[in-house]
Image (cartoon, helix red, strand yellow):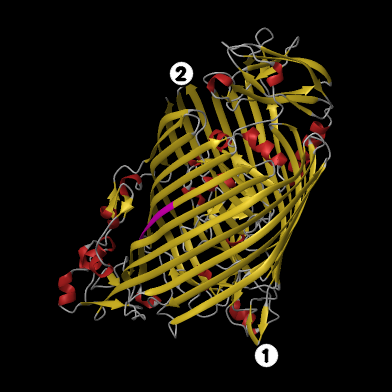
Amino acid sequence: MRKIIFSLLLLTSVFLSAQETGSIAGTLTDTEMNNEPLPFANVVIKGTTKGTTSDFDGLYEIANLEPGTYTVVFSFLGYETVEMPNVQVEAGKVSTINVPMATTGVALEGVTVTTVARKDSETALLIDQKKAIEIKESIGAVELGKIGVSDVATATTKISGVSSSEASGDVFVRGLGDRYLSTTLNGLTVPSDDVEKKNIDLSLFPTRVIRNVSISKTYAAQNTADQSSGAINISGRELVGTSELGASYSAGINTNVAKSGVYDDFKISPNQSDVTFGFYNSNRTVQEQITQQGWNTRNQENPIDYSFSIIAGKRIKDKLAIFFTASHSKSYEYQKGLFRQYRSNFIDDTITDATTYRNKIVNTALLDMTFFANDKNRIKSSTFFVNKIDESVFEGGRNGEATIFEETNPSEGLFQFIRDQNTKQTRLLVTQLLGTHEIGEKHTIKWAGGYNLLNADEPNRIRNEVNWDPNEVEPDFDVQLGRTGGFQQRKSSQLIEDTEFNGYLKDVIDIIKEEDNDKSFKIELGVSYRNKERDFSSEFVGVEETSTNAINPTSIDKIGNIFQQSYFDAGILEYNYLGLNANDERKDLYTGKLESMAGFVDFNLNLDKWNFDAGLRYQKDEIFVNWDIGNLFPREGESTQDYNNLYPSLNIKYSLNELHALRLAVSRTLTLPEFKEISPFEYVSPTGQITRGNSDVTASRNLNYDLKWEYFPSTTQLVSVAAFYKDISDPINKVRDRGSAGVFSYFNSAEKAEVFGLEAETKIDLIKPTINEEDGTQNGHKLNIVLNATRMWHSQDLKEIYNENGELTRTFRYKGIEKTDLQGASDWIFNTSLNFNTVGENQFSASLNANYASDKIYALGVPTDQTNRDIFYDDAIIEKGFVVLNAVVSKIIAKKWKVTLVGKNLLNPEIKQTQSILTNVSEVAADSSAERIEEDKTVSSYTTGAGLSLGLSYRF
């Protein structure tokens, strides 16, 4: 399969390169409508049947023309026909003609030769990619709409070398995960909405609010040095044309939710009584929630997915463009499968019916205002707001088979039941002001300032852990409260507030600008600043019996019935609290501050076919984390880290001709640890897995090398091959810590990690429409295919740490393994889409797209006993590869209506994690020469369901 795919890419390249033809391309604009793009105009080679029509962005191209001289005819109903004679077409080159169309005659001397295009169309982004100095790939709103992608997170996976983890939710670029990425909106950083992440959840950005999303896979000195695999930038939507007004609505269902026994019994938490239109509001304290709010789940009637949105915009006197869009959506998901946890090759926990009911409400709004003072001065204001309620109800053990380590003795005949109800409220406000000013002929000043406010809270998390007697071995009870800890019945609250100020100021100085000779030299000077502060608090209030079996719930569905104030007053139940912190509050706290200041200079020299871009950035990063956490002794502590470094970058581009280019990039960057990776706070997942920060973790340093060949046979087609190599010193990994608790934590567990990869990408037009010889109109349909593939080889050594006396204090090696793969990196990544659409009015379109990422390490293996690490260890947890298949079909009706049918995750694959387990530990412990018997055990498995939806939109 691998050989076939690469052979196809190679044959495609040879086939396209063999064409000794040229092209005519350009943009048609409407002078009657302030030079807006003019779609559906006819472009024909006079005296032939060859021609095309302009697309929605006014772009057109007539490809595969024999070298020679032509007359090109531009026509549109009601407009003057324009004939452009003596157009020279050369082999392997593109002749660009931009034509303004009008109801009256157009002078040919008014025809320009500079392409102008929207930044959300596929053609415009390919042109941008072709012109870019760095190695960059983008995907725009137009293309995303064709393939049915609804959010930015999914959009990024359509770019070569990009995959995502279903288990962690992280986006991986070239095998490197969340901590190696940086995310910006309009060039300014945005905060993470999750304490466990560095980057914001990209699914919060619906494609409706973006122009495009791009990934710069090579570092440039203008950007933060805190990256290695790439920088993701989301360009916010702006007004297109003079006005916009529209609305849309869609409804659908998840196939797992639609199952019998799920649809009519879909569980939600009692927190929903405090939620209005996606906004959570409750004035009760955590302790008051114990007796004043329920614990039992409720049922959701008709769990059907839906969404609606509005869009409006207006241009006022060519000076001010205002654009606004807002949306509200609700979705449901159901998962059921297996969960196991092993410790030192022995089973700890088993839940054979791990079940999650999830519902999510998302409200978004974007207001963009752009002021055009004149053609040299522009100021843009962008405000983006997101409100999200993401609720999960987890249950395990309802089938009477769950066992949790050390909860009960097997001889008791009892099993366990766990319910965890968690409501996450995220509110994000991003407000930005950006300006561009051309001063004289030499200087272009660009500046931006932003303020971000994030509240990412778990206002009321409800957890129950009980022992259950499904087989009636106990005569006195059916349900017994868990008896191994004071917080097994609890309600808790976790509050996060991040505030951030950021900005930049830069001056682009054109020293030499000789367009006729294709020579230029410019210098870009600038400074940037970022100040991010976090306040984190966590409060637990537990409930326990004063004596075992003092009170017993009547069933697992009525656990909450016992938490009555009268039982506390009678001394049957009692509260359990966290210890007092320095503020005399029973809370765990930490605060974090990141201050990053930088100055940079970038030199760009263009000499005909060569372009050299060399940059240098000085960046000073200070991280300060202060904590007051009850599970530590002493409970108070702090960590201060200071990094001052120079970060160089070099990007070289050589244009073999107008269609072919070679690129080389070299850079040095760093990877800073996040607040949550430093603070030793313990976060407990619904299944009971614990993740804790490590104050000893430090930044990684990265060397990045890239080489790429690109071929653009036309404005809509691309073939490219790239090679890349990354050298990472002291990489940060998530691994199991030593000790009986089996806590996951963060360590610089290796001296060095290496990633080498190859990427190949192609976008090919398989079928093009025919041209009517008499009037030049298009007939028929278009069919194109997009395919990209990535192959990676990656490894990291496993560190051993010795003290000053030469004694081993910590090792990450086990069973003879001294090297392992990089966490989150797949060997193979494939993305492909097949897109069909008719031409002309009332278009019909259909798209089928698929994504596959092979097996990857979810968590590294680790020894649990350093002395006997060949026997007692936890092997790496592997997330198995799977295919995601999506489809979308749409039809425009009467020009203004559009009907869309979307199918997501149609194959509904099993999401599975496995772990290799040594099954004959006792035998190997007694005789080290005994044959080792290892088996791959499934530790997690579930499906997420396929999503089917039908949408209707209207543009006024």
Q: Is the residue under label 1 in contact with that under label 2 (CB below 8 Å)?
A: no
Q: So how many labels did they put on this image?
A: 2
- Position in image of residue 751 (x %, y %): 70, 73
Residue 426 lies, with reference to residue 886, above or below; the image says: below
Examine the image and state in which quarter residue 403 appears: bottom left
- Position in image of residue 489 (x %, y %): 31, 70
Residue 79 lies, with reference to residue 698, above or below; the image says: above
Instruction: Look at the image and tell me in which quarter the C terminus lies.
Output: top left
Examine the image and state in which quarter residue 848 appears: top right
Q: Is residue 486 magenta?
A: no
| Side of 416 where 284 appears, left or right | left
Question: How far apart in space, not on screen, are marks 2 and 1 (Cα)?
Answer: 79 Å
Element on which disc 1 rests: loop
Q: Which residue is mark 2?
A: 894
Q: Is residue 507 visible?
A: yes
State whether the magenta stretch is mostly helix, strand or loop.
strand
The three-letter amino acid code for the residue at tag 1 is: Glu
Q: Which residue is mark 1?
A: 804
Q: Earlier in the sequence, mark 2 or mark 1?
A: 1
Instruction: Look at the image and tell me in which quarter the N terminus lies.
Output: top right
| Side of 638 where 669 appears, left or right | right
Q: Is residue 881 visible?
A: no
Residue 452 lies, with reference to residue 744, above or below; the image says: above
- Position in image of residue 51 (x %, y %): 70, 17
Residue found at x 57% / y 50%: 447
What segment is highlighted magenta in the picture? 421-429
Give whichever of 527, 864 is nearer the camera.
527
Give whichever of 359, 752 is nearer the camera.
752
The three-letter amino acid code for the residue at tag 2 is: Ala
Residue found at x 36% / y 41%: 304
